[in-house]
Image: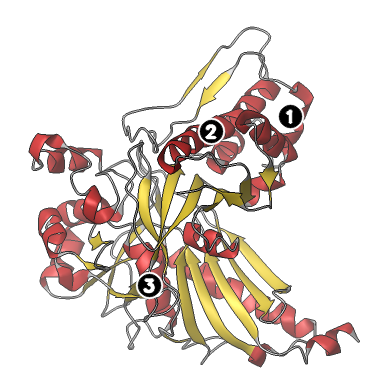
Amino acid sequence: MAASTRLVLGPLVGAIDQGTGSTRFLVFNAKTAELLSHHQVEIKQKFPKEGWVEQDPREILQSVYECVEKTCEKLTQLSIDITNIKAIGVSNQRETTVVWDKTTGEPLYNAIVWLDLRTQSTVERLLKKIPGRNKNFFKGRTGLPLSTYFSAVKLRWLLDNVEEIRHAVAEGRAMFGTVDSWIIWSLTGGKNGGVHCTDVTNASRTMLFNINSLEWDIELCQFFDVPMSLLPKVRSSSEIYGLMKSGALTGVPISGCLGDQSAALVGQMCFQDGQAKNTYGTGCFLLCNTGSKPVVSDHGLLTTVAYQLGRDKPACYALEGSVAIAGAVVRWLRDNLGIVKTTEEVEKLAAEAGTSYGCYFVPAFSGLYAPYWEPSARGIICGLTQFTNKNHIAFAALEAVCFQTREILDAMNQDCGIPLSQLQVDGGMTNNKILMQLQADILCIPVGEQFSVCAL
């Protein structure tokens, strides 16, 4: 009876959530926002050299197809008609860079993940071209410092170091995009007429995009020596980009696209100036809505496009504090040190310790992001004694996430003028009750699902 009731609930919407650690496809009731079904697949990361982080674009795409098909199978088993899915949105890991061949549809190199540090020498070389080696030289246009984090330097590295990509560019076969572009192009036909586009939120993380004019910037492209022919067309975050061309949802329009942290801001309904959220995923990202005008930070934060909900609608902006390593430190304890078999065990170990007993962990595996922007920093565990055990290290790892959040919250409070009184949170790590209590204790404000307000 319950299943048959759902059949008449009206239109459904699907959401592709392609993150650093996993891909999910979720289907919601469009009227009630009830989650009807979903499927999730973990994504492998490759570390071919020190500081290098890659993923296989084919694996990313296959995980999307698998999640869509499995979710549709689950819906069918629940007697829910998948023809009621009327639209699909895409949310994606940002900055991760893909270059592919538009004639074959195949990637020309692994995706360089946002965490990757191989471009440090590229950044140093580019800094020599800037007066005073000022890494904030383009911040007025891009909202970003020159850093290994953003897509332009990753693309520059690919153009400098991958012969196959240089040939493809010379022959007019190469396409560049962040993960959203790769997914949308592939789902809308790929080499057979796929739509090569991105949205303003993802474009604003490339360092090639002018966040004031909302267009690719000719001078920035010249500075990075990036041919503009490689770039996707920039669209708003809410419009029909194209139709699904294969699988169970053939013909369904792809009609929304947001970088994952913008998607979290929208999902938390932070549509008013000063509303903020923090997402605890692979990294940690605190965003505060600043309204229709970009606010430039004086304290090491980024200015980014938060969303543009329609091609004729104004863009809204956000201040962002980005931490490279959050949930990734738990994965590291599991995969590199082997002190746990599952990520969930870290909470149990930390609970058994109850304190780090003076052990401190700085997980700067990919340098330090906000507010320092120091790519040469490396991780450290200190304060060790003969008494220290894996429980204390687990506790210190969770504390590290909280301390990093405290630093970016302090920076945001300085930029905002009035401190945040509450912090709204989401992401996989929020299931960890020890972490959330530690965060509230370290911030001295409530942490949960109430709106945070930061007066600008």
Nearest the camera: 371 or 313? 313
Relative to residue 98, is residue 295 depicted above or below?
above
Amino acid at circle 1: Leu
Question: Looking at the picture, how far across and down is residue 197, in whole percent?
Answer: 33, 76
Q: Secondary structure at mark 1?
A: helix
Residue drawn at point x = 44 percent, y = 43 percent: 416
Indicate the position of residue 190 as horizontal and vertical percent values. Answer: 36, 81
Q: Which residue is mark 1?
A: 349
Q: Would residue 298 be found to the left or right of residue 307 on screen? A: left
Q: Would you identify the image quadrant in which residue 158 lies? A: bottom left
Q: Is 366 on the left or on the right of 273, as rendered?
A: left
Task: Say which residue label 2 marks.
Answer: 406
Q: Which residue is mark 3?
A: 314
For residue 446, above or below residue 305:
above
- Answer with left or right where residue 160 lies relative to residue 445: left
Name the residue type under label 2: Arg
Closest to the observer, 88 or 218: 218
**Amino acid found under the numbered disc labelled 3:** Pro
Which is more toward the observer, 455 or 57? 455
User: In front here: 315 or 229?
Assistant: 315
Task: Give the alpha-carbon distance from disc 3 to disc 1, as whole Å.
Answer: 48 Å
